[in-house]
Amino acid sequence: MSQNDLDQGRAIAGRVERFVRDIVIPYETDSRAASHGPTDALVAELRGLAREAGLLTPHIGADGSHLSQRATALVLQASGLSPLGPVALNVMAPDEGNMYLLGKVASPAQKRRFLDPLIAGEARSAFFMTEPAEDGGAGADPSMLKTTALPDGDRWIINGRKAFITGVVGASIGIVMARTDAGDGRTAATMFLIDLPDPAVRVERVMETIDSSMPGRHSIVLLDHLSVAWDRVLGAPHEGFRYAQVRLSPARLSHCMRWLGACRRAHEIASDYAVRRHAFGKPLIDHEGVGFMLADNLIALKQAELMIDWCAGVLDTGALATTESSMAKVAVSEALFGVADRCVQVMGGTGVSGDTVVEQIFREVRAFRIYDGPSEVHRWSLAKAVKRQATPAGT
């Protein structure tokens, strides 16, 4: 990664921060920022403003080139200063991760059909991997995949149920992961690109979850004899598990980037409150119990920033960085949850009310400790790596 790339990231991040603070934050009280996420009308309005400012999908150039992960981190952190920032700038999940995957794996024709509308902010997408627990399907363990795809002449027929599918309501593009038979006895999966809506893709219900920042929310979806042409296979057949890692390692880190920005905002609000609010004859900030919590926030925010930058640097070498992204996901999600929790505590009753965005940031960051793999699964994966490294060769 060149110094010029990092300088470009800093310049874009500065513009993004001004845009989010001046233009996006006032929309946080808009009635269209609803409990099931911002409405499509609000998304379109915000993206129109970002487009006018020359900041739509700011981490991807007009020629399709992508900022380095270290430079992207600066941009996504700035976008996260408002829960609506990633939506306005077209760097939200799952679209940002789907764009990254399509850029790495899709054919030129698939990029024109599916990636270009995403980069242009003209479409939303969904990633169909997780399955309902009651079906015994894939969650943190993708090898438990139950959804099947069977070849049928010049098409594939997909059947199964998916759960926690973010953004499917209103999406026009989907990436479906299904179990396929590679003919060699191994457990294999294939990814498929689909157009939405499709009568064979039915939303059974939109789930009620504690987060509310993503358009289309999270749904249980039935895939009932979904017919997909062979040219809609993403990449090569039976390579879905490998492609999932191509997508998930950077996507985990992107979550860290966005929520670092959000928690910096929460810390700003809590600090301002602690300076202005008086109790027992002095400002709250002068009480050690409050001041020390805010001091701990500064430490945690800096630790999260450094962890993100380190992991982004590893990804920039071209490595999959699954171990590094697991470490970053655990460390950053738990550090940021501590920041959000302390902000709520500092602000007392105001902190648990909707009078500021702090309450929403707390809910969103709590969910982040589970999404893209709960901390316990990542720790388990890291423990296995420790065991491998500690076991002498040949024993």
Image: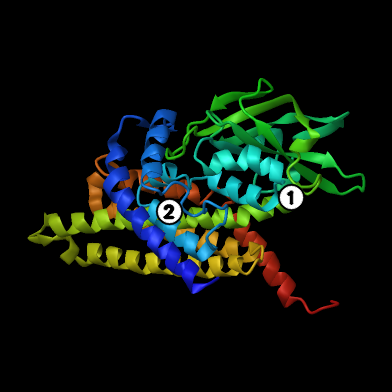
Q: Which residue is mark 2?
A: 259
Disc 2 packing (10 Å; few <14; some 14–19; many ≥20): many
Q: Which residue is mark 1?
A: 241
Q: Position of residue 299 (x, y in %)?
A: 36, 69
Q: What residue is at 33 percent from the left and 49 percent from the top?
A: 20
- Looking at the rendered structure, the kind of residue marked 1 is Phe
**Whether residue 130 is visible:** no
Local secondary structure at mark 1:
helix
In terms of depth relative to the viewer, which is nearer, 354 or 72?
Answer: 72
Which residue is at the far front?
63
Asked whether, in this view, residue 53 is left or right of residue 137, the answer is left
Asked whether, in this view, residue 341 is left or right of residue 90, the answer is left
In terms of depth relative to the viewer, which is nearer, 214 or 51?
Answer: 51
Q: Which part of the image, by quadrant, shows the C terminus?
A: bottom right
Whether 373 is drawn above or below 135: the answer is below
Tell me which corner region of the image, top left, top right, bottom left or bottom right, holds residue 375: bottom right
**Whether residue 290 is visible:** yes
Local secondary structure at mark 2:
helix
| Mark pair 1, 2: CA separation | 27 Å
Which residue is at the far right?
184
Q: How many marks?
A: 2
Q: If you read the primary sequence from the N terminus, does the residue marked by circle 1 or circle 2 appear first?
A: 1
Asked whether, in this view, residue 67 is left or right of residue 343, the answer is right
In terms of depth relative to the viewer, which is nearer, 209 or 48?
Answer: 48
